Amino acid sequence: MRVLLTGASGFLGRNFLLRAPEGWNILALYRNDASFPAFVQDLERRNIVAAQCDLESPGEIAATLDRHGRDWDAALYLAAKVDIPWSVEQPREDLLQNVSPLLNLLERVHVDNFVYFSSGAVYDGLSGEVRPDMPVAPTLPYAISKLACERYVDFYTRRRRSIGRHLIVRFFGAYGPYEAPHKIYTRLIRAFAIEGKDSYTLYGDGQNRIDAMYVDDAVDAILRMINGQCWNTTVNLAGGHPVTVETLARQIAHLIAPAGVRIEKQGAAHENNHFWGSTSEMQELFGFKARIGLAAGIARFSEFLGARAKENV
């Protein structure tokens, strides 16, 4: 199977490549991560080809597809500009950087099965458990841009027909190796396990909900979806154990430093998330349920970060 992967150098992209089947011939598109070619080379997988391509440039996309082909059995679209505070300050740029790359690609490619990773942020403004069949009307700029992308994927399936079938995945997050340094799981583990701090300061009141899964579970879900038989619909991908950010911080602190640490708060968060994603659709359609608990996930991730810290000494 020929698979086109965008956002390949990111957190989820790298973990997907680590576990992708050897029978899949994957073109891994990345924008400007200088370390990514070496990462792919170290995998020693001839079925994976890294290609630098700025999806904001129609010319670069055309040149890349001229070299590697315009017809693909499947595509996994992970590329995104994820910066919620920035989106609030720069809504126009957020829209352009999330929507334009998608349109640029879909104007020039044909994909039989297209998996688009959206965000649970599209439920902005709702409370409690949220399901894909609920009406959404987000006011957060990042959420608006992701919802617009969802509708364009449907357009290119039903009207332009450059997509044969699609799946919209409203992702509620993951944590693990190669996570961005500013993400909360990385910051908490570094603070308590590597830096030995006895306190941590949250931004905001700590009451936003979070329901991330360990990244191996997320990759398992992706593989099931690409190989699955359910298309032209929308699903949530959530861990199934929603907690407040403050509770998460205290849980991780207890796992790493059971003697106790202080969790403090300051400022106001740009998000107001009091919702969590349903998990029944993924169980019913793909037989998927996140299986790696927080204790096991934090242990694995702590080991990875500790090893990386020693390498950089």
Image: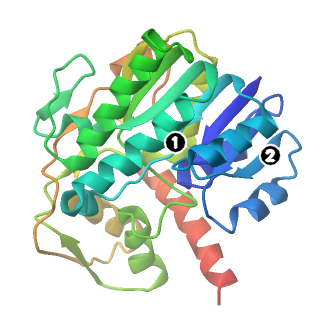
Q: Which residue is mark 2?
A: 49
Amino acid residing under circle 2: Val
Which quarter shows the C terminus?
Answer: bottom right
How many numbered marks does the figure carry?
A: 2
Tell me, yes or no, whether the two marked residues, 1 and 2, touch with CB atoms within 8 Å. no
Closer-to-camera residue (83/180)? 83
The amino acid at mark 1 is Leu
- Give the percent coordinates (x, y) of residue 166: 49, 18
Determine which quarter of the picture holds residue 186: bottom left
- For the residue pair 267 and 96, the one nearer the viewer reads as 96
Q: Position of residue 82 (x, y in %)?
A: 37, 54
Residue 78 disc label: 1
Q: Identify whether 191 is placed above or below 300.
A: below
Q: Position of residue 291 (x, y in %)?
A: 49, 36
Which residue appears at 65% of the width and 24% of the height? Answer: 74
Q: Residue at x 30, y 60 (%)?
A: 251
Name the side, left or right, on which 196 lies relative to 205: right
Residue at point 57%, 61% (across, down):
178
Disc 1 versus disc 2: distance between alpha carbons?
Answer: 17 Å
Q: Quadrant of the N terminus?
A: top right
Helix, strand or loop for disc 1: loop
